[in-house]
Amino acid sequence: MFAVRRYRLFLLVAISLAISVYYLTTRASWETTDAERVGRVHLKNDPTAERPIVNNPLVVPQRPPPDQEAADSPATTSETRVISSPSTSTDLDSSTTYSTKLAEPTITSEELLFKDESSTSGLDDENTGRYEVDEDSDDDEKIHWQKPFIHFPFPEDEIIGLPSGSARKLPRVQAVLQEETSAARKDRLRKLSVIKGSFKHAWNGYKRYGLPHDEVKPLSEGFADPFMGWGATLVDTLDTLWIMGMTKEFEEALLLVEKIDFKSSVRKDIPLFETVIRYVGGLLGAYDVSEHKYPILLNKTEELAEILLGAFDTPNRMPLTFYNWAPSDTSRPRRASAHAVMAELGSLSIEMTRLAQITKRDVYYDAVARITNELEKWQPKTLMPGLWPLKVDASGCGKAARRGKNGENGEGKVDNSKTEEFDINGEEPAIKPKEFTSDQEERHSGHIAERSVPPPSVLMEKERDTLLPKEQNQEVLAVACTPQGLSAEANFKSQIYGIGGQADSTYEYLPKMHALLQGRSRQFEAMYKNALHTVRDQLLFRPMIKDTNREILFAARHEFKPKAKAKAKRHVVTYEVTHLSCFIGGMFGLGSRLFGIESDLELAKQLTDGCVWAYASTPTGVMAELAAIVPCPDLDVCAWNETRWHEALDPDKEERFAAVEAWNKNQEAIYDRARKEVNDDSEGEIDRETGELADEKEPLQFVPKVALSHEKHVKARIQEERLPPSYTKFEARHYGLRPEAIESVFYMYRLTGDETWRQKGWKMFQAVQGATQTVVANAAMEDVTSQIGELDDSMESFWLAETLKYFYLLFEEPTAWSLDEWTLNTEAHLMKIPED
């Protein structure tokens, strides 16, 4: 009894704690939604990431049984009943299954519709699709896909089908090559064997340390999952295995592909562009090169494609480039991003078109055809007619205003209707639309405009009553949205135009789509010609190099800043050497043959040779990611001028001198004030040890700074920054095992049959292989200007899927995988051009 009394306070505290823990635990299980638990995946990696919106008033229908999925259509799906609160659940049709995880709404449907779903925390500007999630996450933290509710359905007769009619006879693309000698054949086969050996080494390293994950880490012998964790390198590399004759490894890989669960991932947002080019393209490419012998490849493609189609469920059918695919997200209406990257929007067409051709399902082609139509409409209206800016407003909503209770319009929230009329120099546009010529009247067999999706406002008024309860419907309709097509970002501070990163494959796909559709649509030819007109006139430049007999070209970048005070800064041209732009030589060459533009073949050679020169220009023989260079005054004549290069290295010489002079004056004034505060006539102090007058201390003196002379400044920059002749700056010194340069070299050899392209390609291979191979596989280089050889612990899937494939195809028998029979997507997956 004494013991109980003694510890009664302790027992009371313990009982209270137990009750509290039980209460909190059960409360969490009642109120924590799947969206909150899934959201923790991103919050772990980025504490500043926005927490997902929960307690959605919309209901998510459960996925029907597999035998019913084929019968589903937009019409039947739109009849699914919806409730707004648990209190209405008694009225539900007993034949329909609904999710019951509902709560009071914390956000209106209007706010949901206007929330930008494509912006994702933690994504960098250079490669927005890469985002590595926690590899140790358990199953409760994963997204589990369910067939989503369709918010913006349209009748089947409005689906844009593949272009019909007879195929046009396309011009021959590949050159007719002479029969090689016995010695040349032996040399070629030896090089082919070396390249295949490099591939096997990297593939085995991935198999040992990376599978079933997206990538291998070649230095730490680990793995990474930046692309959903579905085995990006595995899927991306399938057709390379087949092309290299590694049939056993190919079939072993298919066993792993069959196990991929595309309906589940830790990552909550699917990077649409990366997923389409690596996964959909990888599966389809393997299906085509293996002559359709393995049905599992097509089955897995359709499984993934059905998930991705949900990204196109927006009012204007422009896709969510980062698709939040959890049921809690797909249950609410969303618009496409007002800040989309051009390449991520415009580079989905080859894969989805080829899937439509194989499956005979037009819905896949419809998804990308609508994007193409909008790009075509906008093309002549941009600041550089023919080209599109790197960042795009794809929302379809040009002006938003809230109506009052009586229907009156309020003040507009956003108005970017005038962004296209930016006056670059305060006088008149630098590039006038009248220079833009187009064949746009001949549109896609005449059925594009008629079948385009109705504007958002029409869709909302037409369809909302069947999708939302009346109360929520009124909130959505309270948003007045001026319909618009693709546009520049609203209130933009700058617009950037170029043909490299963030834009590249949008242009690359134009001639390839023309070939894939066998010329049945004139749309892609017209868009390509209009784009190339501006590229030739405004982007191409010749760099000033020491080898004056070598005519090479690069593509510049233009930036427009309407709010810049100085007129000179409203339109800035950057003369750059960027690896991502190196595909342009192959594109020019392919287009020259397909569209009969013979003069472009010479430009293609000069553009490709420019990237070959960029490889040879560095100490390692490998091209940097991004650098600036001195341009020639014109494209025809350009002598080397050391003085001009040095002037470019010290462009702010006068300002630099003036800044030092100003600093000296300021410091001298400070020292003068300090001296005046000291009484120079005061007696010195007595030394306590000697009793004598201490020596006067040295007076305070100012030592002026001396600015480096122009010569010393230039010499220091060249030495410290390791700048080869012609270069003025390295914006990014690394090499990420990229394929674009060797891609164009491959195209130039196949188009011309000139053996010098093989010689150039072999030197590039030796340099890259020597600098990047590790014990495990190959690793990206940190600095191509340094001979120390520091590497980055990364091997992206395109090293096996693209770079080594192009090296291999360069030395393969030219009749194999002919460009007259095959086209390649941006990940170098071979897609069969169908026979008429």
Image (cartoon, rainbow, N blue to C red):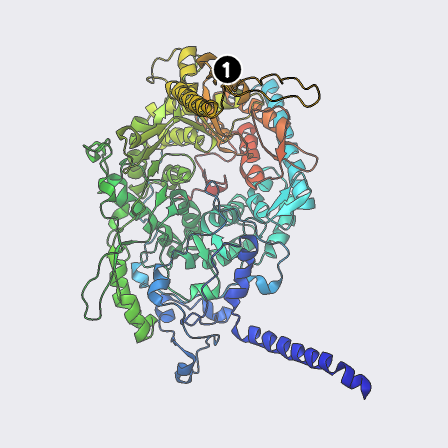
782 or 771, nearer to the observer: 782
On screen, 699 above or below 24?
above
34 or 75, nearer to the observer: 34
Q: Which residue is mark 1?
A: 715
Name the quarter where the N terminus is drawn.
bottom right
Please tell me in which quadrant of the rendered image residue 403 appears.
bottom left
The reply, left or right, for residue 126 in relation to residue 440 is right
Q: Residue furthest right?
A: 2
On screen, 817 above or below 657?
below
196 or 264, nearer to the observer: 264
Q: Position of residue 532 (x, y in %)?
A: 32, 32
Q: Is residue 144 visible?
A: yes
Callout 1: SS: helix
The reply, left or right, for residue 773 in relation to residue 649 is right
Count of residue discs: 1
The reply, left or right, for residue 348 in relation to residue 387 is right
Q: Amino acid at mark 1?
A: Lys
Q: Residue at x 33, y 15 (%)?
A: 636
Q: Position of residue 40 (x, y in %)?
A: 55, 60
86 or 699, nearer to the observer: 699
On screen, 393 above or below 13?
above
Please tell me in which quadrant of the rendered image residue 241 appears.
top right
Q: Residue at x 52, y 61 (%)?
A: 39
Q: Is residue 596 visible?
A: no
Q: Residue at x 32, y 49 (%)?
A: 164
Q: Position of residue 329 (x, y in %)?
A: 44, 63
Q: Position of residue 665 (x, y in %)?
A: 41, 21
Q: Residue furthest front?
A: 691
Name the quarter where the C terminus is drawn.
top left
Q: Label 1 crowding class (10 Å Cα cut-off): few <14, some 14-19, many 20+?
A: some
